[in-house]
Image: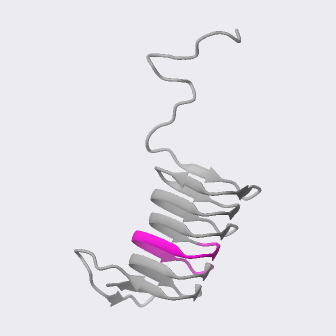
C-alpha cells in the first residue's frame, strides 16, 4: 500500500498539465520569491518578488511587497514595488501601485491608483490610443 509505485505510463500521480494555473489563496501569506512558467493568480499576501513567464492576475484582496516580472498581468490588488510586463499590463479600477512600470502596453482603468514612473518598450505593433472608458497607452 505505502510502498506501491504510483506511476502510470511514466507519469506521477502528482504531475501537472503544462497549462495549469498556480494560485495563492486570500488566506495565505508567502515570504520569499515566487516563480512560475505558466499562468498564476494571487489573492493573498506575498512578501518577495514574483516571476511569471505567462499571465498573472492579482486579485482584489492581494498585496505584493516586491517587484513583479511577467509577460502579461491584470492588477486588481495592491503592489508595493516595480512591475515589468513584456506584453500587456492592465491596472483595474481598484488597483493600487506604488512603484515604477516598464511595459509593452498599458491599460489604466478609471479609479486605478498609480504612483511612479512608466517606461514603455517599443514593440512591433506600437501605437497610442485612448478609449472613452479606459486609458490605453502603447508606445
Q: Residue at x 49, y 16 (%)?
A: 8
Q: Where does the image place residue 66, in percent across and percent down from the top left?
A: 63, 69
Quarter where residue 42 is shown: bottom right
Most foreground residue, 120 or 62? 120
Quarter where residue 50 is shown: bottom right
Q: Is residue 134 visible?
A: no
Q: Residue furthest left?
A: 124
Q: How is the image coloured?
A: one colour
Left or right: 87 in relation to 95 = left
For the stretch drawn in magenta, the main secondary structure is strand
Span of residues in magenta: 76-94
Compared with residue 8, is residue 100 higher up or lower down, i.e. above or below?
Answer: below
Most foreground residue, 138 or 66? 66
Compared with residue 45, is residue 133 higher up or lower down, i.e. above or below?
Answer: below
Q: Where does the image place residue 114, in percent across and percent down from the top left?
A: 57, 86
Which of the image's four quarters has the C terminus?
bottom left
Q: Is residue 12 visible?
A: yes
Left or right: 65 in relation to 119 = right
Q: Is residue 83 magenta?
A: yes
Which of the image's four quarters has the N terminus?
top right
Q: Residue at x 26, y 80 (%)?
A: 126
Compared with residue 50, is residue 15 higher up or lower down, i.e. above or below?
Answer: above
Q: Residue at x 53, y 23 (%)?
A: 12
Q: Is residue 117 magenta?
A: no
Labels in figure, total: 0
Q: Where does the image place residue 43, in percent across and percent down from the top left?
A: 67, 61
Compared with residue 55, is residue 113 higher up or lower down, i.e. above or below?
Answer: below
Q: Residue at x 57, y 70 (%)?
A: 67
Amino acid at each position: 500500500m505505502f510502498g506501491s509505485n504510483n506511476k502510470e505510463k511514466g507519469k506521477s500521480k502528482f504531475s501537472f498539465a503544462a497549462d495549469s494555473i498556480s494560485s495563492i489563496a486570500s488566506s495565505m501569506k508567502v515570504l520569499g520569491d515566487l516563480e512560475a512558467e505558466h499562468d498564476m493568480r494571487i489573492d493573498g499576501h506575498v512578501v518577495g518578488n514574483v516571476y511569471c513567464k505567462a499571465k498573472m492576475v492579482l486579485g482584489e484582496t492581494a498585496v505584493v511587497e516586491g517587484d513583479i516580472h511577467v509577460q502579461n498581468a491584470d492588477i486588481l490588488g495592491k503592489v508595493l514595488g516595480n512591475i515589468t510586463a513584456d506584453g500587456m499590463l492592465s491596472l483595474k479600477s481598484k488597483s493600487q501601485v506604488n512603484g515604477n512600470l516598464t511595459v509593452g502596453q498599458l491599460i489604466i482603468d478609471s479609479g486605478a491608483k498609480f504612483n511612479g514612473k512608466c517606461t514603455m518598450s517599443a514593440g512591433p505593433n506600437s501605437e497610442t490610443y485612448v478609449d472613452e472608458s479606459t486609458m490605453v497607452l502603447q508606445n
